[in-house]
Image: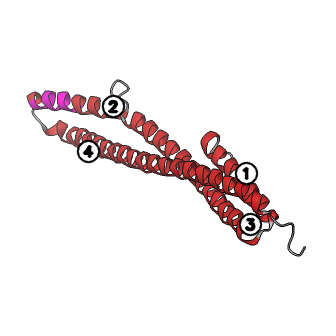
Amino acid sequence: MAGGAHVDHGSNKGVALLIAVLALFLALAETGAKSQQTQAISSNIEAANLWAFFQARTIRQTTVRTAAEHAALGLPVMPEAAQAAIARQQEAWRATAARWDSEPETGEGRRELMTRARSAEEKRDRSLAAYHMYEIGSAAFQVGIVVASASVITGVALLAVAGGLLGAIGVGFAALAFFAPTLVHF
């Protein structure tokens, strides 16, 4: 027989079952991919918002420090009563600038914001890696479905085997996406 072994019509039920299972795994992989894509977008927005807050804190901190330094320049020519008031204001500005650098109780100091932003970026990167693994798995399932379907039309049993192997590859990538998305890099 040319072209490999042929499928008898009784085994078409087995190929149909293979196609159904591949379609089920395709649906699961696509759902996982969409979920990870959504998570990546949310984490990216969170990271961007935290970095914007960090930048705003940095600008305010710089402005307050500059005001304290600028006030110090005028102190020698001011009357003593004004010098005391300006010195108190300078201390208040410096305390505010220090608080904005690290504010562990609220998590809104520059250091804490930087840590939170980096954490959101890591979550985003992991979600993107999982998304890509799910997408590769989905592609393997789709091609497996097409190849297995071709075995029904052509009667070539090796196409059904190839479809099953592609399905196994798809399961492998979907498992990587779920358990260890950053294990393999493409």
Q: Which mark is residue 151?
A: 3
Query: Which stretch appears magenta?
Result: 82-90
Query: Number of marks in the image?
Result: 4
Q: Earlier in the sequence, mark 4 or mark 3?
A: 4
* Mark 3 and mark 2: Cα distance apart in space: 71 Å
Q: Earlier in the sequence, mark 1 or mark 2?
A: 2
In terms of secondary structure, what is the magenta stretch mainly?
A: helix
- Tell me if mark 4 has few (under 14), some (14-19) or many (20+) residues whose alpha carbon lies within 10 angstroms of its own: some
Q: Which residue is mark 2?
A: 98
Going from N to C along the chain, the mark reached first, 4 or 1, is 4
Q: Quadrant of the C terminus?
A: bottom right
Q: Which residue sits furthest front?
A: 10
Amino acid residing under circle 3 = Ser
Q: Is residue 82 visible?
A: yes
Q: Which corner quadrant of the image does residue 180 belong to?
A: top right
Gap between marks 3 and 1 measured at Cα: 17 Å
Q: Which mark is residue 63?
A: 4
- The quadrant holding residue 98 is top left
Q: Rate crowding at label 3 as few (under 14), some (14 to 19) or many (20 or more) other CA atoms within 10 Å.
A: many
Q: Is residue 147 above or below residue 166?
A: below
